[in-house]
Each structure stands twice: as structure tokens, then as C-alpha cells.
Amino acid sequence: MKIQEKYSLKNLNTFGVDVSAKYFAEVKDVDDLKYAIEFAKINHFEILFLGGGSNILFTEDFGGLVIKLNLKGISEEFLNENEVLVTAKAGENWHEFVQFCLSENYGGLENLSLIPGNVGTSPMQNIGAYGTEIKDTFVKCKVLNIQTLEIEEFNKEECGFGYRDSIFKGEVRGKCVILEVTFKLSTKNHQIKTEYGAIKNELDKLGIENPTIQDVSRAVISIRQSKLPDPQILGNAGSFFKNPTIPLQQFTEVQNSYPQMPNYPNGEMVKIPAGWLIEQCGWKGKQVGNVASHELQALVIVNKTGNATGKEIYDFSTMIIESVKDKFGIGLEREVNIV
């Protein structure tokens, strides 16, 4: 393993922001990872762990050590005739991992097809789409304690999963790094989820009445490709904001002025689609300088010209937050990690 200086991160973040790291190391096993961490400790460098670079916005050069996690490998352990534990190392590409599971007819992750990023970052924000979240199939993950350099394990309860949230974004943030993740998937009696979003409509278009998990995956991929820009072509980090959840009383007050507002009640709270709020404020397709809100999905901020700085993108997101707050009295929270 080589530790490099003044390393460009432009091709390692899906926004394509042109920034660099003072020091950079790509690690392929735990020993390399421990060495890189020790190097940072001895020299008192801040550490940033980088996976697929799909949920991060660099607003400036990073003055410490960026560690690119490239740990690879997938293993399986059959529990019974209908359940299998599948473990993937942190550096495995998430979509490729999902496709591997589908090729083996393992069910449970098909609704999470085509989500960008790597396996190691998936538990951090409890990634989810089309009625499915990581926590639904998550069993455990192994992590490296940055202070002690000992390997530890977290089960599902210990991870404290919430909406786009986990313990890894809270109390243990910066204290450990995920090495591998284990999921419990089905091998025969799959639970097909087609009721959320446009999946059923997409299956109807394809003339599929009794979908397989592979059919659901194809439908999800088709929907995502029709709505979301390819980061390889147009720099973006997918959904930039979380869907806000507000108290029922507040929702009722806002709904009086906007009766057409889509909503998803959950007890005393109501989730509102952030994309709808942003679109109502006139941001869909709007461009300011090098940055724009995508013309097909207002929730996605794009590096329109390819020359946007991280600060430009951040400032653009701030303008959106302020306009939604002014119009609806609802606060938006960034889903993307800001560095």
C-alpha cells in the first residue's frame, strides 16, 4: 500500500467536484487499513473514509488522510432451505452486490437496485427505496475500532436504525469504520413488494402479473433510470434532501393552504415528499451558475456544467432550503454528507 500526497478526488466523488486530499491511501485488507490509520494518528491527521463517493459533497480540499476502502469479497451461509446469510465486504459496489444476490435467487434487496455507493456505507444512513430499507434484512456488521484497532460487531438493534439514520451517523461517528455487512435473505418463499411507488405500473407495462424478484429489480432499475441522472454523465449524489416528517397538527395547518400536498401519515407524524415541496417553489430544472435542480426530479441537485465547486452546490442547496421554509414553514435536511 502506498500513501500518496496531493491526490485528486475529482473522480472519486459522484458530483465530480475538483478537490484534492493532502494524503490518500487505497486499502484492500484490514492490515492495510490499520497501517493507514496508524500513519494518520502518528502524524495527527484527520481521517476521512471514502466508499463509492456517492453521498458526499466536498466543499474544499481535505487537509488530512483520505482512506479509500476497497475491501472485496462475498460469502454465503445457508441457515435452512429458505434462508441464507450473505456477507459482503465494505468495498463491494452496492448495485453489483444486489445483482449477485438476484443471480443466486436470494430475495430481499431487489427494491434497492441501482442505488449508488458501496456496501460499507449502506448501513450508515439505512439506505432505502420503494418500501424497503437496509434494516429489513440487516443482521450484523463488523467494524474496526479506530482507537483500539480491534474488530467489533454490531447487531441490528445496536445500530439504532431510523429513517436515513443509524448509530454510525451519531454516537459512533468517527470512532469506527465498517468492514463488512451481513444480510439475511430468502432463497425460496420471497416476499414481493410492488405496492410502493410506480413499481406495479412498470410491471403492468411489461405485462407481468406474477413478478419474480428479478422482475421487481428490472422495474426498479427502469424507474430509477427514467427519473435520475447517471452520475457518469451528469454529476450528482442522488437525492440531496431527506423527505421531511412533520407533526400531524403542523401538516393539517399547511394542508389547509395546499390541499393537494402528497403525504404519508405515520401515527402522529406525516412524511412529505421533499421533491414536491422543492418543485412547488419553482426549483425543478432551475439553474444558477454551474448548478441546477434536475429537470425530471427536483430532489436531485446536479453539477450542470461539470465545473461547479462544492461551495456552489452547497449554496444552491441553502437557497432551496430557505425557499421551502419561507413558503411552507417546513425545514429540509440535507441527506448528503458535507465535507
Image (spheres, rainbow, N blue to C red):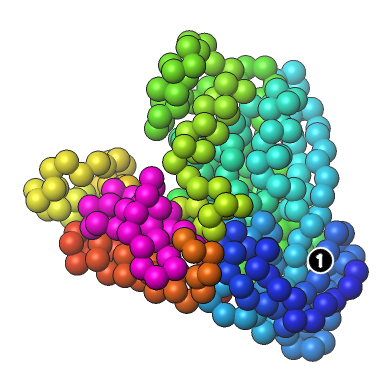
Please name whichever residue, 81 or 338, is drawn nearer the observer in this view of the structure: 338
The answer to which of 101 and 96 lies nearer the viewer is 96
Q: Quadrant of residue 301?
A: bottom left
Q: Which residues are magenta?
A: 275-303
Left or right: residue 254 versus residue 76 is: left
Q: Quadrant of residue 31?
A: bottom right
Provide residue 15's location: percent of width, then percent of height: 56, 62
User: Looking at the image, which residue is at 74% across and 48% down?
Assistant: 92
Q: Position of residue 229 (x, y in %)?
A: 50, 48
Q: Quick check: can you spot residue 304?
A: yes
Tell me: residue 226, above or below residue 244: above
**296 in the magenta segment:** yes
Residue extending furthest toward the bottom: 43
Magenta region includes residue 176:
no
Residue 55 appears in the figure: no
- 276 displayed left or right of 65: left
Q: Tag 1: Cα neighbours inside 10 Å, few (<14), some, or many (≥20)? A: many
Q: Position of residue 288 (x, y in %)?
A: 36, 68
State the quadrant of the C terminus.
bottom right
Residue at (81% x, 55% y) in the render: 71
Name the image quarter holding the N terminus: bottom right
Q: How many marks?
A: 1
Residue placed under numbered mark 1 in the picture: 26
Where residue 60 appears, x then y in whole percent? 57, 80
Image point (49%, 64%), residue name: 305
Q: Amino acid at mark 1?
A: Glu
Residue 156, compared with residue 216, is above or below; it is below
Q: Residue furthest left?
A: 256
Element at badge 1?
strand
Query: Where 227 falls versus 65 (above or below)?
Result: above
